[in-house]
Image: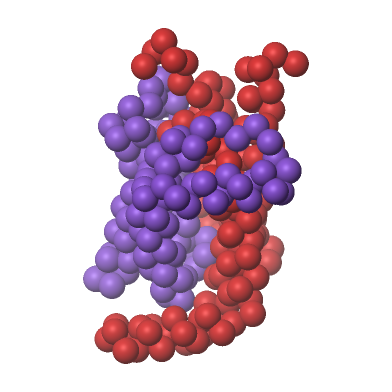
Chain colours: A purple, B red
């Protein structure tokens, strides 16, 4: 049980933290307008020059291995809904660390998603 | 097509790709991990051995390939859309993964869990009605 809680924390907090770093790195690259494979490869190459990208990737790698371990212990249909907390973490993280404006409607959507995922979490099966 | 409409179209096309690839990749990961015995010993050496075995599974690598493609699509959409928009919008992938778990992995899903999934859809719809990018003057 303790192991599962630790894995859960790694998936939710470290995973979401990693995504926030990746998001910050991509914002420094600027909007992608050309979707040809060579252009996408150049964008990925430029993204890899940003230190925040590597911090994000390292954190997401930790979350990935935690996810693998969790998947060996529980059902797929349980593991993913149980990480619902990341939506609230994402909204708060986007607001606080990336200074994104989160509109009331978006907060409402996040709230409904979280209620739904909590229901999923507490249902049997 | 107005620039804002174009932004919406490419945002939703990429989100559609994301909510397809991520669940499929994770389903393959789940399938691959179920082929291994569950972790019972959390000593570092055993963990290393466990993950090494996982990395020799073809099913796991299919999952990783799908998740890598998802990650590229995710990076592209994050180059213009707010993280707090992208993250909840891609929660539709939870619905897709429940369907894949049920039909591909034959997992039983309780009615309460399906009800939760319906609420997730409602939340995703609410989030989808908001602007994908924060207007400059509001910063």
Of all residues, the one furthest to the left in this rendering is A2
Side of B88 relative to A42 (left or right): left
Side of A123 relative to B73 (left or right): left
On-image quarter of the C terminus of chain B = top left
From the top left corner, tell me how far across and down residue A73 is, in percent.
Answer: 42, 75
Tell me if I can see residue B126 in this picture.
no
Picture residue at 63% right of the left edge, 65% below the top: B65
Closest to the observer, A123 or A55 = A55
From the top left corner, tell me how far across and down residue A101 is, in percent.
Answer: 38, 22
Q: Would you identify the image quadrant in which residue A25 lies?
A: top left
From the top left corner, tell me how far across and down residue A95 is, in percent.
Answer: 33, 30
Side of B19 relative to A113 (left or right): right
Of all residues, the one furthest to the top in this rendering is B137
On-image quarter of the N terminus of chain B = top right
Tell me if I can see residue B61 in this picture.
yes
Q: Is residue A56 above or below residue B124?
A: below
């Amino acid at each position: 049980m303790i192991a599962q809680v630790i894995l859960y924390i790694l998936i939710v907090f470290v995973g979401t933290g990693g995504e926030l770093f990746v998001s910050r790195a991509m914002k420094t690259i600027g909007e992608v307008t050309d979707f040809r494979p060579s252009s996408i490869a150049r964008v990925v190459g430029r993204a890899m020059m940003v230190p925040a990208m590597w911090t994000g990737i390292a954190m997401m790698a930790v979350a990935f291995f935690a996810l693998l371990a969790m998947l060996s212990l529980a059902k797929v249909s349980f593991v993913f809904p149980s990480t619902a907390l990341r939506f609230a973490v994402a909204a708060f993280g986007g607001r606080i660390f990336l200074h994104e404006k989160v509109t009331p409607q978006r907060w409402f959507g996040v709230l409904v998603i979280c209620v739904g995922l909590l229901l999923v979490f507490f249902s049997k099966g | 097509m107005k620039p804002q409409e174009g932004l919406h179209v490419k945002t939703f096309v990429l989100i559609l790709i994301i909510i397809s690839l991520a669940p499929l990749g994770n389903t393959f990961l789940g399938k691959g991990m179920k082929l291994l015995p569950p972790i019972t010993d959390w000593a570092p050496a055993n963990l290393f051995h466990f993950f090494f075995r996982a990395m020799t599974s073809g099913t796991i690598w299919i999952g990783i390939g799908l998740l890598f493609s998802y990650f590229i699509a995710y990076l592209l959409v994050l180059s213009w859309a707010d993280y707090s928009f992208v993250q909840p919008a891609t929660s539709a992938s939870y619905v897709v993964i429940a369907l894949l778990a049920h039909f591909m992995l034959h997992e039983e899903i309780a009615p309460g869990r399906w009800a939760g999934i319906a609420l997730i859809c409602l939340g995703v719809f609410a989030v989808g009605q908001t602007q994908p990018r924060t207007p400059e003057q509001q910063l």
